[in-house]
């Protein structure tokens, strides 16, 4: 099956299926015009989701795809209090951020009431939470035994990335 000029694989039946890759002229919304060099396209129940190729090489990639599939399947009111469903753009933004983070461990990914998503890492050194809102805003919360900080993530090269690297390890 093809989507535009990109090969698409249906992951509903087999999450370990291979896909084609290509050069992507798509712009990174967090950059100042730099292009993302490669991406892969995966079909995740049933919408097409663009996945940065760098993420596909992580050992926990399949688990992240399964989790994204579960989150995209959430219906309106999933939390019994009118929780909004998660949209493809929010999943794509989360995956793009995850691909650029210096992480060795998979995050826990949980839905937010407004249709956003939150990635979480918890360790003895501290906790990191990254929220991706459906309107595109991203915020980071870091808690350590010494302090708690929260800030909006304005770009992947945000100066606060150094603090993320110290907690997440690379």
Image: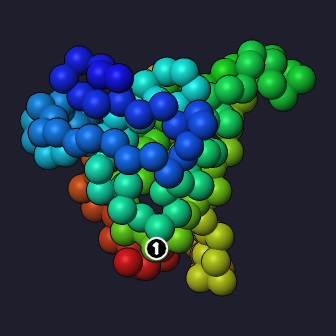
How many tags in the picture?
1
Q: Is residue 104 above or below residue 114?
A: below
Q: How is the image coloured?
A: rainbow
Q: In the displayed structure, does residue 136 sit left or right of residue 162?
A: right
Residue 11, position as x, y percentages in the image? 52, 37
Q: Is residue 87 above or below residue 107?
A: above
**Quarter of the picture holding the C terminus:** bottom left
Q: Is residue 116 visible?
A: no
SS of the residue under disc 1: loop
Residue at 49% x, 21% y is 47
Q: In the displayed structure, does residue 144 sit left or right of residue 152?
A: right
Residue 37, position as x, y percentages in the image? 14, 46
Residue 38, position as x, y percentages in the image? 19, 45
Q: Is residue 59 visible?
A: yes
Q: Nearer the viewer, residue 104 or 83?
A: 104
Residue that numbered label 1 is attached to? 104
């Amino acid at each position: 099956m093809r989507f535009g000029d990109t090969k698409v694989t249906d992951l509903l039946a087999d999450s370990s299926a291979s896909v084609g890759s290509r050069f992507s002229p798509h712009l990174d919304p967090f950059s100042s015009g730099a292009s993302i060099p490669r991406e892969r396209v995966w079909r995740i129940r049933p919408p097409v989701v663009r996945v940065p190729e760098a993420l596909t090489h992580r050992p926990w990639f399949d688990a992240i795809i399964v989790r994204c599939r579960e989150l995209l399947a959430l219906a309106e009111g999933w939390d019994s209090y009118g929780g909004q469903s998660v949209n493809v753009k929010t999943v794509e933004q989360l995956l793009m951020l995850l691909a650029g983070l210096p992480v060795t461990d998979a995050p826990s990914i949980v839905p937010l009431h407004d249709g956003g998503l939150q990635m979480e890492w918890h360790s003895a050194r501290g906790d990191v939470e990254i929220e991706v809102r459906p309107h595109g805003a991203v915020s980071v919360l870091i808690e350590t035994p010494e302090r708690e900080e929260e800030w909006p993530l304005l770009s992947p090269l945000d100066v606060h990335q150094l603090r993320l690297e110290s907690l997440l390890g690379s």
